[in-house]
Amino acid sequence: MQALVFDGTQPVLAPRHRDPKAPAGEALIRPLRMGICATDLALCRGYTSGESETPPFTGVLGHEFVGVVEATGSKADAHWIGKRVVGNINCVNAACDLVEAGLRDHARDRTVLGILGRDGCFAERFVLPVENLFAVPDHVDDDHAVFVEPLAAAFQILRQLTIEGRPYITVLGDGRLGLLVAQVVNSLNATVRVVGKHEAKLRLCEKWGIRHRLLSDVGLRQDQDIVIDCTGSAQGIQTAMAMVRPRGTIVMKTTTTPGDAPVDLSPLVVHEVSLIGSRCGPFPEALQALSAGTIDIASLISKRMKLADGVQALHEAARPGAMKVLLTP
């Protein structure tokens, strides 16, 4: 089958990649839409998922998808066949203390779709545990459903923040994730603004009623109660520390890659700032929001390309000013 593979040095299109088979407890899925994420681009630059002693990823890329279940490894799961699904990307191989403590997405020996120890979804077929699947409502189309995974990551922030009074919240970064996060946190009892570097992207905030400013026009006065770093850049945390007030909170959605410049974190200590890492999130809340039509997805899609043009699509997604690039089979 055809697959978009990172070989350790560069992404390549493999026209005859091995066909996967679903083992017991897993499903064989045919993707209908696939979304290129900043993490996919980072993997091609040597990102190692943050796990200790983890070698750089090699294999099929991709973790954002909506697809159809074509087969299951266990007869007991056959009722999933033919269903349109999305899926949690964290796959538990065995129970551990973290799983038993309710931290399933942080299982010690987990694999992660297209990121850690498991081939991803940028292929004609891939496999994922049945327990990870969520059925997509019929009225949610493929273009919207493919956003469930990143939208769930945005909703994770609501689970992690404690909102008191009417705080000032800055979403730092006007890319794909930042604009999803902005729409989600705008539902809070807070004054929300987006700060970024691209006027065209920031103008999208006008239709959502969200304040926005160019970074070059913002004074770094340490006056924000909460700053959410969605920049995808190692400089993001530095800017966030210059924006957040003493005893404020920074939420980091940004991961860095080897070779990024080290960051002086001493301001966190001096100003007693809380730093919260934020990763994957709740699929049910994301599906509910898409079902209710409360999140604008159409404005975030910049291009649709074929899987056969996957290498070019990765370059397109990395282009300054690009939004979400979707792949179709």
Image (cartoon, grey):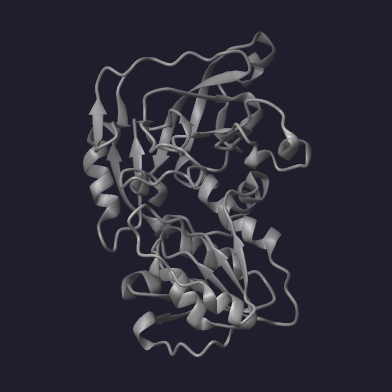
Left or right: 189 as drawn, with respect to 140:
right
Residue 127 sits above or below residue 170 on the image: above
Q: Residue at x 41, y 68 (%)?
A: 174
Left or right: 87 as drawn, with respect to 324:
right
Residue positioned most to the right: 101
Q: Specify the quadrant of the image occupied by residue 293.
A: bottom right
How many circles with numbers are drawn on the protein?
Answer: 0
Q: Quadrant of the N terminus?
A: top left
296 or 96, nearer to the observer: 96
Residue positioned most to the top: 75
Is residue 115 at least partly visible in the picture? Answer: yes
Residue 20 in picture, x, y percent from top left = 43, 16
Residue 69 in picture, x, y percent from top left = 53, 22
42 or 135, nearer to the observer: 42
Residue 263 sits above or below residue 257 on the image: below
Q: Residue at x 57, y 52 (%)?
A: 279
209 or 184, nearer to the observer: 184
Is residue 225 at least partly visible in the picture? Answer: no
Residue 325 in picture, x, y percent from top left = 34, 48
Q: Quadrant of the C terminus?
A: top left
Left or right: 109 as drawn, with respect to 316:
right
Residue 292 in picture, x, y percent from top left = 63, 54
Left or right: 170 as drawn, with respect to 216:
right
Q: Specify the quadrant of the image occupied by residue 328.
A: top left
Residue 30 sits above or below residue 89 on the image: above
Q: Residue at x 78, y 41 (%)?
A: 101
Residue 10 sits above or below residue 228 on the image: above
